[in-house]
Amino acid sequence: MMRDHYVFSSGRLQRKDNTVYYIAEEGARKTLPIEKIRNLHIFGEVDMNTKLLNYLSQYDICIHIYNYYGFYAGTYYPREKNISGFLLVNQAEHYTHKYKRLFLAHQFIAAGIHHMLRNLRKRKKETATSIEAIMAIQPDLQTCTDIPMLMGKEGQIRKMYYEGFQHLIKQDFVFSKRTKQPPNDPINALLSFGNTMMYQTVLSEIYRTALNPTISFLHEPSTKRFSLSLDLAEIYKPLIVDPLILTLINKRTITKKHFENLEGEICYLNEEGKKRFLRAWEERLQTSIMHRKLKRKTTYRYLIRLECYKLIKHFINDEVYKPLKAWW
């Protein structure tokens, strides 16, 4: 089974013949099963060379780099092998055409809101005010005629969602509002870390299709970012990240001792906290549900790949795009 591999300690990744070793600073050597690794996530200070990068590229392995605090720094993205000029032209045309772009942006947001309401409805009594507020403003999305208007309404809905989100937390964590740059409390630290992992997971699935990750529709394409992963993540953050955070907190798998603060302003998961989150993250991505269209069990991770395939069908006018809206 393919899986992601996470490196926390400092050391060196080295290729010798057709084997990759991780050599820790104290000299311990570990062999990495390259044929079974989908992505490498580097949280420690790790040395590597072009010989290694060339070898990892042969196996289509993306390397995601994070700084000491667990904030995303960048990705080594191997040369794309699934290339289609026809698809690229059509994907770009859906961005340049105002209403085609707006349609896709609406779909991403609609699916995200569906999953937000799904979370809040698990405790209807405590979150009734937020649910009603979201449902009252939801019809206004259909009146949005450009992307900034749409994102403005989505921002209002997300604010209402987070006001209800705090009622889903059983521990004595204080969560008053969403703060991102930087996160200033444990819940915001978990949301930021979880969303970061979601972006990289989506990116790795996009890489394995012929989609171009830089051409997006809800988020504005720009230099130095794979903005299509931000679009698709809007669907899956409230479906995967938020429920996982609630499970970890409410079951006390992660407590306040798993966080640290920098200068009283930046809150982040310590190493043990990251490890606990990532173990649960991998388990969640491997969780299977019975897909009602495919008539077989499908993992959460593969649902993301299917989302990419649905976009491809939409771009080539094979089938109108319908985003995932959890039915289970």
Image: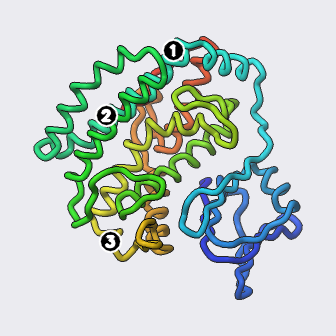
Q: Position of residue 41 (x, y in %)?
A: 63, 60
Q: Position of residue 130 (x, y in %)?
A: 20, 38
Location of residue 49 (image quadrant): bottom right
At 67% from the left and 77% from the top, the residue drawn is: 10
**Which labelled disc corresponds to residue 157?**
2
Location of residue 187 (image quadrant): bottom left
- Of circles 1 and 2, the one toward us is 2
Circle 3 is placed at which residue position?
Answer: 255
Residue 163 vs residue 64: left or right? Answer: left
Q: CA distance from mark 1 to mark 2?
A: 26 Å
The secondary element bearing badge 2 is classed as helix
Kind of residue sitting beneath label 3: Thr
At 59% from the left and 19% from the top, the residue drawn is: 313
Instruction: Tell which of 152 and 317 is nearer to you.
Output: 152
Instruction: Tell which of 101 and 314 is nearer to you.
Output: 101
Sort mark 3 into few (<14), some (14-19) or many (20+) by Cα contacts within 10 Å: some
Query: Going from the N terminus, do you reach mark 3 or mark 1 first?
Result: 3
| Residue at the extreme bottom of the image, as rendered | 26
Q: Is residue 182 above or below residue 290?
A: below
At 54% from the left and 64% from the top, the residue drawn is: 70
- Of circles 3 and 1, the one toward us is 3
Marks 1 & 2, CB-CB < 8 Å contact: no
Kind of residue sitting beneath label 1: Val
**Which labelled disc corresponds to residue 320?**
1
Instruction: Point out the image quarter for the N terminus.
Output: bottom right
Kind of residue sitting beneath label 2: Ile
Marks 2 & 3, CB-CB < 8 Å contact: no
